[in-house]
Amino acid sequence: MLFKYKALKNGNPVEKQIEAASKAAVLDYLQKNDYFPISITSVESKNIKLFTSFGSNISFNDVVNFTRQIAIMVNAGLTLVDSLEILKRQINKDSLRKMVNDISASIKAGEPFSTALKKYPKQFPNLYIALVKSGEASGKLGDILLRLSDNLEKEREFSGKLKSALIYPIVVVSAMIVVMFIMVTFVIPKLLGLYKDFNINLPWTTQILISISDFSSHFWPIIILVVFGAWTLIKRYISTKNGKYLYDQTLLKLPVFGEIIKISALVDTTRTLAILIGSGVSILDALAIIIETTSNSVYQLAFTNVKRKVEKGQSLGVSLEQEGIFPPILVQMSLVGEQTGNLDDTLMRLSKYFEMESELATKSMTTLIEPLILIVLGLGVGFLVMSVITPIYNLTSSFQ
């Protein structure tokens, strides 16, 4: 945010503008630099904000690139402020430049880097801030940022593979449902209307299709409203605590998708735990961050129970085993990592193993889904063809 201040320095009036997170940050900056503040006012333009708000959201890719660039410059020997100033001049995206400006101004005002990042919780979650804070405390911020950027890039690559694998079946199934709805509601009633003028016995498939078509053609607006209303109610229920738990629990029980969701959750949690523990974060603080960052509420509850048991002095491996939802390899390797004192390295190796398992499961899913979609599509088309063509054949036979 841009502020304009009036102050006195050595008895001389000064009037300038400065980027800062708040008026308090500006006041702190003035006092530390021997200014006597007179007034501080915001000069941010509402018109500019209106036009830059469209398409100005900071994406996950922006955060990944920001972390990598800062990590490289800090490890090259540049100060954090100099790195941010260099990065600011290279940014073309207004929202990202504004964020970097704000962070830089906060650091200039005396705030730690981790505190400045807290003002952007959507872009920098607790995991990110905890690692930065650990790097500041240990004096190894550059190393921590490099490790963090590696983690973010792996996360981006992994999520990209999952999305690309799921796009094909989702698009095909969605298109199939839409085409079937349009055919049954608008096209087929016109074809089947020809049969009403002839006294012929219609096969049961045609009678079913006529009933579905009549209902859809007369009540299609109601069908759309009912579907939309049901979707809205389901979304609202899922947003509740009980609904979210039931939804996540159901997803984990799905035949093929459930296994992929399980492994994906384990990839994220093991990698995150490995980085946190390797960066000097205590196991309890690491588990607290895992609980906050885990999206699946079933695993969230499990890690909450694990954290409670670890607080009482129980080992991590035994606590994981007692929950019953973690695979034996995670339990065994956690016990080995605790006994050898290399828990972070063991968990990182596990995350790579789970990542490979996830890729194999995703490939198996796509291999299974493609012929399944073709079979369902073939059955649907065959049903339509039989329902429309068979009466025509019966009609021509009766004329002969």
Image (spheres, rainbow, N blue to C red):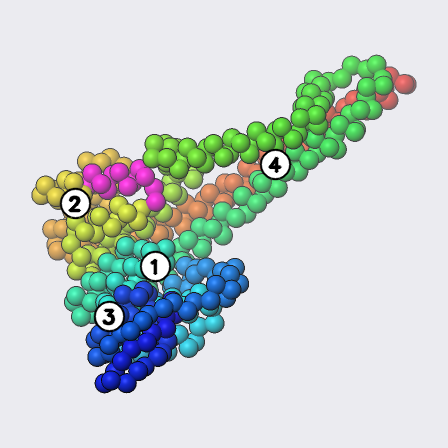
Q: Please name the amino acid that badge 3 sits on.
A: Asp
Say whether disc 3 or disc 2 marks the residue closer to the N-terminus.
Answer: 3
Depth check, mark 1 against mark 2: the one in front is 1
Q: Which residue does the image show at 12% across and 43% down from the upper left? A: 311
The answer, for residue 69, to whether it is visible in the render is no
Q: Which residue does the image show at 50% across and 40% down from the upper left? A: 368
Q: Position of residue 97 (x, y in %)?
A: 42, 70
Circles 3 and 2, Cβ within 8 Å, touching? The answer is: no
Magenta region, residue range: 295-306
Quadrant in which residue 319 is drawn: top left
Quarter of the rendering occupied by the C terminus:
top right
Label 1 secondary element = loop
Label 2 secondary element = helix
Distance from Cα at disc 4 to Cα at disc 3: 61 Å
Label 4 secondary element = helix
Circles 1 and 3, Cβ within 8 Å, touching? The answer is: no
Distance from Cα at disc 1 to Cα at disc 2: 32 Å
- Which residue in the protein does label 1 denote? 120
User: Is 200 placed left or right of 367 in the picture?
Assistant: right
Circles 4 and 1, Cβ within 8 Å, touching? The answer is: no
The outermost residue toward the right is: 400
- Which residue in the protein does label 3 denote? 28
Circles 4 and 2, Cβ within 8 Å, touching? The answer is: no
Q: Please name the amino acid that badge 4 sits on.
A: Ile
Say whether disc 4 or disc 1 marks the residue closer to the N-terminus.
Answer: 1
User: Is 184 placed left or right of 60 in the picture?
Assistant: right
- Which residue in the protein does label 4 denote? 177
Say whether disc 1 or disc 2 marks the residue closer to the N-terminus.
Answer: 1
